[in-house]
Image (cartoon, rainbow, N blue to C red):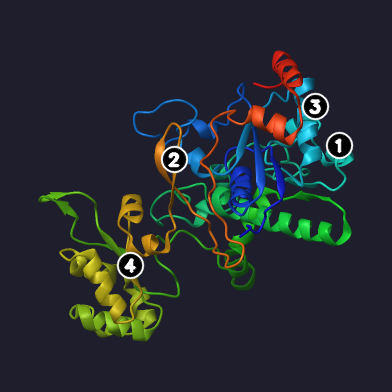
Amino acid sequence: MKAALDGLKVADFSWYGAGPICANHMATYGATVVRVESETHIDALRTVAPFAKDKTGYNVSGYFNNFNAGKLGITLNLNAPEGLGVARKLVEWADVFLTNITPRVIERWGLTYETISEWNPKIIAAYQPMQGYDGPHKDFLGFGAVLTPITGYSHISGFPERQPIGLGTNYPDYVINPGHTLVAIMAALHYRHRTGKGQRIECAQLESSVCPLAPAIFDYTANGVEQNRIGNHLPIASPHNAYKCAPLTNGGRPMDERWVAIACFDDDEWNALAAVIGDPVGDEKFATLEGRKENEDELDAAINAWTADKDAFAVMEDLQSRGVPAHVVQSAREMLDFDEHLKARGYYVYLDHPETGRSAYDGPPAKFSKTPGELRSPAPLLGQHTEQVCKEILGLGDDEIADLMVAGALQ
C-alpha cells in the first residue's frame, strides 16, 4: 500500500523547527526528503535537550530526532562554489524546495526563486521568513519564542497579577507555521498537477502566527475589549481551572503532583458538578454563570478543597460519567507510559536509533485508510547519507564525490 506522498521529492534546506517539521510530515506520508545540513554551522536544534541518557554529541537530541525522522541527511558547505553546485543538482531533482533560513542568507547563497526556478521551472519553492521578504522588519531574526510575544500570545497568556509567560513552548514552530506551509505546498502541487507550472510560496511566520488570534482581534474591533491574561479561566465557562488532588505516591513517597482540569460550559454540567460536591458550592450565588464568574475565586477555592484529598483519576472518571468535562493533567511520563487511550491507538512509534537506542517518536498526525503514513526510519545522523544521496539521487561517481570532498563542498 503506497503512502499519500509516495514519489514526491523534497529538498529540505531548513533548520530548527518550522521548516523541518513541515518536511517531517511530508516524509511521514511517503515523500523522499533530503535534509541539507552543515558541519560548520550545526543546526542548533541538535544541541537542544532532552538528550539521550549518558549520551553526548550532535546525534542524541530528542528534540531534533523527533522532528527529522524518515529523512536522508547530507552535509553540504553552501559557502563553497562547489557546494552550491550540489545544491543546484538537488533543486533540479526535487519537486519541492523548502527553507526557513533568513532571507539575506538565501540571497547570498543564490537560492531565491528567481534563480532556482531557472534550474527547475516546475519547482515548488516554499520560503518561511520570520517576518516576510519585504517590510521594515524583513531582516529581523527570531524563533518561536520571539514570535509569541510580538504576535500577542504572551499578552493574553498567564495570570493577571503576574508578568506575561507566553505559551511555555515555541507553539508557532510546532503547529501553525509548519501546518500552514504544508497546506500551501499541497495547494501548489495541485496547481502544478493541473497546469505543469511551479510557483513560489512565501509563508511569513509572523502572519501565520497572528492568524489564529482572530477571536481576540474581533473582540477588540467589534466590542472594544482588549483581551488580557486571565489564567486558566474563560469568559464563557465557570468553573474552568485545574485543581490540585492527592499526590501520586510510590511506596508512600510523593512522585508527581496531581491535578484535574474541570470545565462547566452550561447549567447542566454545573448542576451535575454541584450535586457531587455539595456544600459550599450549593450556595445560590453560584447558580448562574454570571454569579459563578463574579465569585470565581471563592468557587475555585471550594473546588480545590474538595479535590485536595482525592485521587485525580477517580475524580475524572466520576465527573465524566456525570457529563462533566474533566481530565487528569498528565505529565509526559504518564502520557508515554500509562495513557491507555494513546497506547490503544498506537500513537507513539518506537524506532531504533544508532546512538540513542530505542526511542519514542510522535507518530503520524492523521490516519489515512488508503494511503497511510508511517515513520520509516529514525532521524539521520549528521551527514549519514551524504554518499548515498550523491550516488543514488544525484548520480555522482566516486571521483566526483572525492573532488567535492577535497574542495570542502561535502563535509
Q: CA distance from mark 2 to mark 4?
A: 33 Å
User: If the image is split into quadrants, where does the C terminus sit?
Assistant: top right
Q: Secondary structure at mark 1?
A: helix
Disc with the residue nearer the chain's start (1 vs 3): 3
The residue tagged with tag 2: helix, strand or loop? strand
The residue that appears at 73% across and 31% down in the rendered structure is: 105
Q: Is residue 257 above or below residue 274?
A: above
Query: In what element is the residue under mark 4?
Result: strand
Give the mark, 4 or 3, whose residue is nearer the N terminus.
Answer: 3
Quarter of the N terminus within the rendering: bottom right
Given residues 1 and 332, the one toward you in this image is 1
Q: Is residue 144 left or right of residue 252?
A: right
Residue 225 in view: yes
Question: Within 10 Å of the Cα at label 4, are there few (<14), some (14-19), or many (20+) other Cα atoms?
Answer: many
Q: In this figure, which residue is indicated by the disc labeled 1?
A: 115
> Pointer 4: what residue?
327
Asked if residue 282 shows in the view, the reply is no
Q: Is residue 192 left or right of residue 10?
A: right
Ranked by sequence position, the earlier of labels 1 and 4 is: 1
